[in-house]
Amino acid sequence: MNFEVLSYGNPEADTLLVQPVDDHDLQVIENEVSYIKELTGGGVFCLKAVKVKSWNRDLSPWPAPAVFGNEDFGDGAAEMLKFLVDEVLDGGDSGSASNVKRRFVGGYSLAGLFALWAGFQTNCFDGIAAASPSVWFPGFLAYMRQNSICTDAVYLSLGDREEKTRNPVMAQVGNAIREAEAIFKEAGKECTLEWNAGNHFKDPDLRTAKAFAWLMNR
């Protein structure tokens, strides 16, 4: 399966940011790029935004029942990751990626969960930027306990009101992300957990920018 790839920033930069996105992300992606530049003191990077076709299918590591709405989660993450590795990291969408020295994958919400999962599958990424990731996803906390992530740097964040939801599955997100931080630190990884003001829908562009900027500033 092919996905649409949109490029922002400097295509010749040696820092590549890879982010699965949907239409809502694309509405504020220019803001995110500006925030990254500001937070990195004018850092030079290329952001490859990969537009998903089905958010719940393309970013889910395994099937799970819907926890909100009626759309179940699929198992398309492996196919998405293969596209990222074969086409985006290797320059298939632009012809060359030989100048890239640092590769970071990240995203918001379910895309943040995908980025974490991708870090367990491959050592292609130098860091993971998981902004308000959906670590409440059924079975994912157990998966993190039982497997080892293949990168040395992980950024985690959450809104301070996200765990106050009435949805019993999603309300587990706070405890899950605290344990995720502990898992990565116990494994000797460089990991930070940043708490942001607000619920899950507040400032996704800024939160994602802070995630990528933390990796770039290390």
Image (spheres, rainbow, N blue to C red):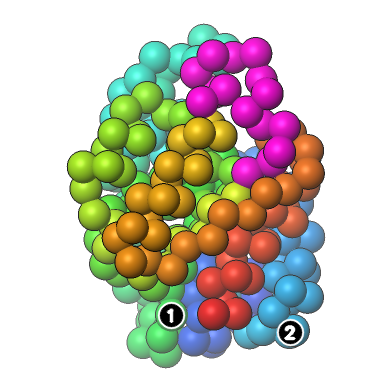
For the residue pair 110 and 169, the one nearer the viewer reads as 169
Reading the image, the residue beneath label 1 is: 102
Camera-side residue: 18 or 125?
A: 125
Residue furthest to the top in view is 70
Residue 17 position in % (x across, y down): 52, 68
**Magenta stretch: includes residue 108:** no
Indicate the amino acid at tag 2: Gly
Q: Hey, what amino acid is under mark 1? A: Arg
Q: Which mark is residue 42?
A: 2
Q: In this view, which residue lies farthest toward the left?
A: 146
Q: Is residue 159 magenta?
A: yes
Q: Secondary structure at mark 1?
A: strand
- Whether residue 180 sits left or right of residue 165 in the image: it is left
Q: Residue 57: where, in percent of width, then height? A: 40, 30
| Residue at image point 24% right, 54% down | 148
**Residue at the spot 74% in from the left edge and 56% down from the top edge:** 206
Relative side of 206 to 7, left or right:
right
Q: In this picture, is 28 found above or below 145?
A: below
Quadrant housing the N terminus: top left
| Neighbour tally class for label 1: few under 14, some 14-19, many 20 plus, Cα within 10 Å | some
